[in-house]
């Protein structure tokens, strides 16, 4: 089965979501992303013990930072899926894309566009 999700989604594979650091999330925004979502294994089912719990904590910290600097924490989300839930992955991609479209470009992108003009 081939999953259908928006072509604006860029997948970055990591061995475990526990390897996703706050700096990675913030760097995505610096490079032009309008939103980031992290998809990890089900809570309590991490083969690296608690990687997904570390990732959830880091996503929450990134949300706080983004709120503080005026970008908006609602642009970052964490989801948990099992490996057999591909269609749900595609659904989350669609939901995040719709959320980001409603929010519009990040203030960083708007500032870069003004600077380039």
Image (tube, rainbow, N blue to C red):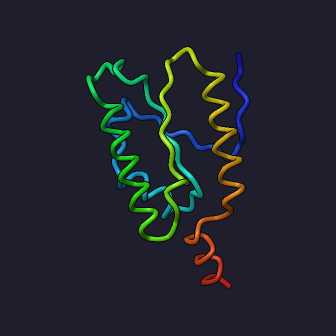
Residue at 34 percent of width and 46 percent of height: 58
- Comparing 42 with 21, the one in front is 42
Q: In this rendered view, identify the residue nearer to me: 11 or 34.
A: 34
The structure residue drawn at horizontal position 47% and vertical position 39%, both measured from the top left corner, is 78
Q: Quadrant of residue 26?
A: bottom left
Q: Position of residue 110 (x, y in %)?
A: 63, 74
Residue 113, percent from left and from top: 65, 77
Q: Say if 38 sits above or below 84 in the image.
A: below
Q: How many marks?
A: 0
Q: On screen, 65 above or below 22?
A: below
Q: Position of residue 33 (x, y in %)?
A: 57, 57
Classify 33 as above or below 92. Answer: below
Q: Quadrant of residue 3?
A: top right
Residue at 58%, 71% in the rendered image: 107
Q: Nearer the viewer, residue 25 or 62?
A: 62
From the viewer's perspective, is 47 left or right of 26?
left
Position of the N terminus by quadrant: top right
Quadrant, the C terminus? bottom right
Q: Report whether 40 appears left or right of 10.
A: left
Left or right of residue 21: residue 71: right
């Amino acid at each position: 089965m081939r999953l259908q999700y928006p072509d604006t989604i860029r997948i970055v594979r990591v061995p475990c979501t526990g390897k996703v650091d706050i700096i990675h999330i913030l760097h995505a925004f610096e490079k032009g992303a309008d939103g980031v979502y992290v998809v990890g294994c089900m809570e309590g089912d991490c083969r690296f013990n608690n990687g997904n719990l570390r990732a959830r904590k880091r996503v929450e910290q990134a949300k706080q930072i983004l709120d503080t600097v005026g970008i908006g924490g609602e642009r970052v989300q964490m989801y948990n899926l099992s490996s057999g839930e591909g269609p749900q992955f595609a659904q989350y991609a669609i939901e995040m894309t719709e959320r980001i479209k409603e929010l519009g470009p990040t203030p960083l992108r708007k500032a870069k566009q003004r600077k380039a003009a």
